[in-house]
């Protein structure tokens, strides 16, 4: 028969061990990490093997940078190493388990963000299907959110081939494409119809909003917005949103 004093001593040792273990695990975030690793939603896709050479970059970010991905289920995965191939319009993820790049299944992605070193805030891209004016079918792209209101401004960070040059690789002549950034800006209406901003000037906006031409012209002049840059366009669309939403 176990003496009462031994039972008390045994309970003290067990209780102390549990408390000591919990303190250690709580200190280094063990339970939090374990919970996240078990229940965090998974990214999926196919192994990415795109290795074409080029003058210029296929990517928005050449280096792997941390970012977040929100799935169509509403679940999110955080602090993943990501690249965005602007030439293919594909999100690439470096798997922490296999250490292989994976082209993420686009239809599963609602939006993603990447922390660019030169930007204060992460750049956010949304997987959108928009009805572009004068197109028969919807356009499905990753579009960067530049302004969001009753009307929105989005940018397709497109990269296009502008030519080729011959180069020698280990004694073999190959043709290398020249790539240049050629972003496309879309103003998206509440009904999801989108209008491409063909040129960065005021007339492009007048053509999209002909019924508000006079009010827009007056407001742009008042605010001294000439639309010579992307930031000018963002300011102009925010101003137009106020006008058309009245």
Image (spheres, rainbow, N blue to C red):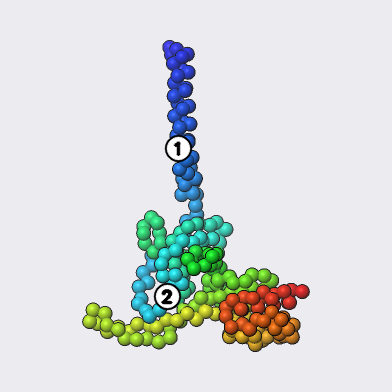
In this picture, residue 168 sits left or right of residue 228: left
- Front disc: 2 or 1: 1
Q: Residue at x 49, y 45 (%)?
A: 32
In this picture, residue 169 sits left or right of residue 150: left
Residue farthest right in this picture:
246
Q: Position of residue 1 (x, y in %)?
A: 43, 12
Which residue carries the number 2 mark?
58
Asked whether residue 92 appears in the rendered view, the answer is no
Q: Answer with mark 2 or mark 1, whichever residue precedes in sequence.
A: 1
Which residue carries the number 1 mark?
24
Q: Residues within 10 Å of mark 1 (few under 14, many from 20)?
A: few
Residue farthest left in this picture:
171
Q: Position of residue 131 (x, y in %)?
A: 61, 77
Secondary structure, mark 1, is helix
Asked whether residue 23 appears in the rendered view, the answer is yes
Q: Nearer the viewer, residue 148 or 71?
A: 148
In this picture, residue 109 sits left or right of residue 217: left
Above or below residue 127? Residue 3 is: above
Q: CA distance from mark 2 to mark 1?
A: 46 Å
Q: Residue at x 48, y 31 (%)?
A: 19
Quadrant in the rendering for residue 72: bottom right
Secondary structure, mark 2, is loop
Above or below residue 195? Residue 45 is: above
Q: Residue at x 61, y 82 (%)?
A: 227
């Amino acid at each position: 028969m176990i003496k009462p004093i031994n039972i008390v001593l045994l309970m003290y040792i067990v209780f102390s061990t549990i408390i000591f273990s919990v303190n250690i695990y709580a200190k280094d975030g063990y339970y939090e990490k374990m919970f996240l690793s078990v229940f965090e939603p998974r990214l999926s896709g196919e192994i990415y093997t795109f290795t074409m050479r080029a003058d210029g970059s296929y990517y928005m970010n050449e280096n792997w940078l941390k970012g977040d991905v929100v799935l169509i289920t509403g679940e999110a995965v955080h602090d993943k190493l990501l690249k965005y191939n602007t030439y293919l319009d594909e999100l690439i993820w470096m798997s922490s388990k296999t250490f292989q790049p994976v082209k993420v299944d686009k239809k599963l992605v609602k939006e993603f963000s990447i922390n660019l070193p030169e930007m204060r805030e992460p750049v956010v891209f949304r997987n959108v299907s928009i009805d572009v004016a004068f197109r028969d079918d919807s356009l499905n792209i990753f579009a960067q959110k530049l302004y969001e209101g009753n009307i929105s401004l989005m940018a397709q960070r497109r990269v296009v081939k502008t030519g080729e040059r011959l180069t020698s690789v280990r004694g073999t002549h190959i043709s290398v494409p020249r790539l240049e950034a050629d972003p496309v800006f879309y103003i998206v209406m509440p009904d999801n119809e989108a209008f491409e901003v063909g040129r960065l000037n005021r007339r492009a906006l007048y053509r999209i909003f002909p019924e508000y031409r006079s009010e827009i012209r007056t407001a742009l002049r008042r605010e001294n917005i000439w639309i010579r840059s992307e930031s000018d366009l963002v300011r102009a669309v925010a101003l137009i949103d106020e006008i058309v939403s009245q």
